[in-house]
Amino acid sequence: MKVVQVGIGGMGNAWLRAVQASPEVEYSGFVEVNQTIAQQQAEKYGLDPARIFPSLAEALNAVPVDGIINVTPPQFHREVSILALEASVPVLSEKPLADTLGAAQDIVDAANRTGVLHMVTQNYRYSIPALTLKRTLETADLGRIGAVTVEFFRGPHFGGFREEMPYPLIIDMSIHHFDMMRYFLALDPIWIYGRSWNPPWSWYNGDASASVLLRFEGDVTVSYNGSWCSQGMDTPWNGQWRFECERGVIALRDDQVTVYRTGEAPEPVEPVATERVAQSYLLHEFYEAVTMGKPPATTCQDNIKSLAIVFNTVQSFETGAPVAVAAVAA
Ligand SMILES: NC(=O)c1ccc[n+]([C@@H]2O[C@H](COP(=O)([O-])OP(=O)(O)OC[C@H]3O[C@@H](n4cnc5c(N)ncnc54)[C@H](O)[C@@H]3O)[C@@H](O)[C@H]2O)c1
């Protein structure tokens, strides 16, 4: 299967490594708007400079393509993804699906109108700790889940678009944690209340800290606390998770899953054994979807429900009121 990767700097590196290691997918071309990055990456990864195009339209005219990988910053996702969908080319897009809910809805509408696959790379679902936690939630037999606590605290200095955008923690990072909530619980939220703020030492223009309370279907309450300008005691990127269940607790702490049955000694859980994780898992899913028609989990039609959590949270920040989660037209 031949793919064109749009955006080869930054996160594009992870995709360059994943595709170059794949026995199923190969590159027919690339799109990069920054000539310096194009030249550097061509040298670093041994890419043919003649196959690096300045626009997706030019690449689609010049090389055979069975799918694109969209690794541009979020504000370009709508333009790039819809151009591919309208040309009947399936899309594997970096998260977030788009930079606004309206842009995300336009992508979903284009995917529905054309009948072409668009899936989002929610790679956090497919790390070993997340896969282990998911399997434990399905098999530990601790009864109903009543509440979940999630903590995420780190202080990365990225530079670039994250330091300029509004609500960088919630829009660029927490989308992974919100999507994981839907994945772990297999439920959707019905009500959200949140408050965001920017600590005095923050190096972001937008609010880098937040506290969000989410009520999911089945009366499961999730409390989420996070910051992207924390000054110590980092949590892992996955965050720290605690599931309060009828007959005990299931926790993900420092990427280790542990089951605490009421009154019994803690049981550390063996990590799952899996052939592929993260980008290679998603690339394989994309390959199977395109070549065999196997439906992937994180289609844009499903993923807009994770993105809606992000923008309903922002609405609550801005109105100071709880938000009933709007049904999105998937
Ligand atoms: N899944 C993850 O864990 C993860 C991690 C980091 C970033 N991301 C996502 O990846 C995407 C890219 O983020 P990044 O950190 O790599 O950004 P970046 O700005 O570092 O890199 C983006 C690249 O795309 C290029 N580009 C921009 N507009 C383009 C266009 N219209 N056509 C072709 N190339 C274009 C830029 O020149 C640059 O090389 C974002 O959606 C981000 O949220 C995901």
Image (tube, rainbow, N blue to C red):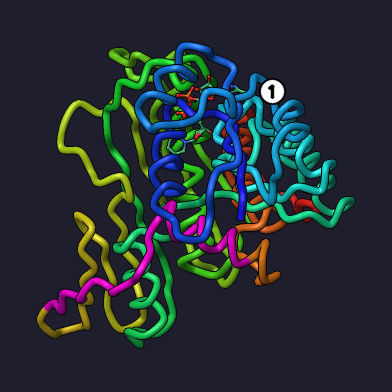
Q: Where is residue 136 in the image (x, y as percent from the top left)?
A: 33, 77
* Residue topped by disc 1: 55
Instruction: Write the residue at 46% across / 31% down.
Output: 47
- The type of residue carrying mark 1 is Ser
Report the span colored magenta: 266-288
Q: Where is residue 290 in the image (x, y as percent from the top left)?
A: 67, 61
Q: What element carries label 1?
A: loop
The residue carrying mark 1 has its beta carbon less than 8 Å from ligand 1: yes
Quarter holding the N terminus is: bottom right
Quarter holding the C terminus is: bottom right
With respect to residue 6, does 280 lie above or below? Answer: below
Instruction: Write the residue at 38% across / 33% down.
Output: 45
Of residues 209 and 121, the one nearer the viewer is: 121
Q: Quadrant of residue 186?
A: bottom right
The image shows a total of numbered marks equal to 1
Q: Position of residue 84 (x, y in %)?
A: 76, 40
With respect to residue 156, does 127 lie above or below? Answer: below
On screen, residue 186 versus residue 56, left or right, reads left
Q: Does the magenta stretch include residue 280?
A: yes
With respect to residue 100, does 140 lie above or below? Answer: below
On screen, residue 157 versus residue 214, left or right, reads left
Q: Position of residue 93 (x, y in %)?
A: 60, 43
Q: Is residue 178 magenta?
A: no
On screen, residue 196 versus residue 68, left or right, reads left
